[in-house]
Amino acid sequence: MGGGDRHETLPEETAMHAVRLHAFGPAENLTYEKTEDPEPGPGQVRIAVAAAGVHLLDTALRQGMPGPFPNPPELPTVPGREVAGTVDRTGKGVDTSWLGRNVVAHLGMSPGGYAELAVTGTDRLHGIPAGLDPAQAVAMIGTGRTTMGIVQFAEPGPGDIVIVPAAAGGIGTLLVQYAKNAGAEVVGLAGGPRKTARVTANGADLAVDYLDDDWPRRVGEHLAGRHATIVYDSVGGATARAAVDLLGPGGKHIVFGWSGEGLHDGRPLAFTEAEQAARGITSQQVLGPVMLRRAGGDNPIRTLELRALAEAAAGRLVPAVQRFPLSEAAAAHRALETRATMGKVVLEP
């Protein structure tokens, strides 16, 4: 990948590699280059990054869309808000016992994760549980905490029949596992035989290719007159409509995104209150602020992060991870945007 020649004269000991964005646009605008090492400020640590998470939101920010933020990022910027690695430097007022510890952190509103070094406050740090590698820890600090936020609104259990669209994705993988662990029956939807095979291996009772227009009939045959009780919907559009049509009275439609395109038309499902009342079904959008209000406490984000890490440490949730070298961040973005990935996308320096 190109870019960054103006930084080649920096002393090697003070020049890290990072992925920078100098102009909004396509994935090719992400350039792998040398830039100055960041230094931790008061209350901060510096992390030698072993894994950095890539989120679908990153692809929107790269194009100059603000997403949930008030404004697009200021340029140039180093994208990325999820990192794991080893603390190699501490700022003023920080307990030096952090040095050398393996940690994972969500950087919040401040980007900087697509790099060999990143800084963040100690209030965002978690020790990486034994048995988790940095990439898995990154998956749980972002994708895992979102999964914990989603299931607050419809906890599955024995007797439930759960439909998970996008079941081969990072969140979908964890939702399938979570529902199975709780004793529910799970139907996972994914695009193409490679992904449906992954969903089956992940424990779903039925994995169906939503690229086949006949998939609702196959699910109906599997249910044999029964009705689904929960749909965890991140795609919207026609796929969500077909999944919701399989819900019975008392069913719950939990919406946490509508990222689809093509078959998934990228819009939330139009589901009126009158239809909900007539069918005895509830539909609820549970995006970030709603999740945090439900989690409660002084630090609801941390509450969800701790729960996610504990589930992974206990072996109840095993995140799916697709790894790319840090230098191939543009390829990672393209793969994510074209639905060519399975699980959480992670960059490794």
Image (tube, rainbow, N blue to C red):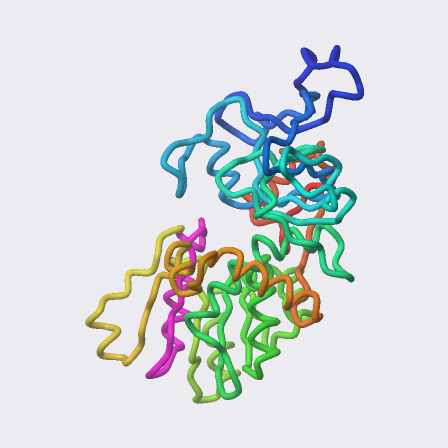
Q: Which quadrant of the figure contains the C terminus?
A: top right
Residue in the foreground of this view, choosing between 24 and 42: 42
Asked whether 85 falls inside the magenta stretch, the response is no
Relative image position of residue 192 (x, y in whole percent): 60, 59
**Res 167 → quadrant:** bottom right
Question: Vertically, is 256 above or below 222?
Answer: above
Q: Residue at x 72, y 35 (%)?
A: 89
Start-end of magenta stretch: 237-265
Question: Vertically, is 278 above or below 320?
Answer: below
Relative image position of residue 237 (x, y in whole percent): 38, 58
Asked whether 260 falls inside the magenta stretch, the response is yes
Relative image position of residue 202 (x, y in whole percent): 67, 69
Question: Vertically, is 319 above or below 113?
Answer: below
Relative image position of residue 222 (x, y in whole percent): 53, 83
Please state if 234 lies on the left or on the right of 100 as rendered.
left
Residue in the foreground of this view, choosing between 113 and 174: 113
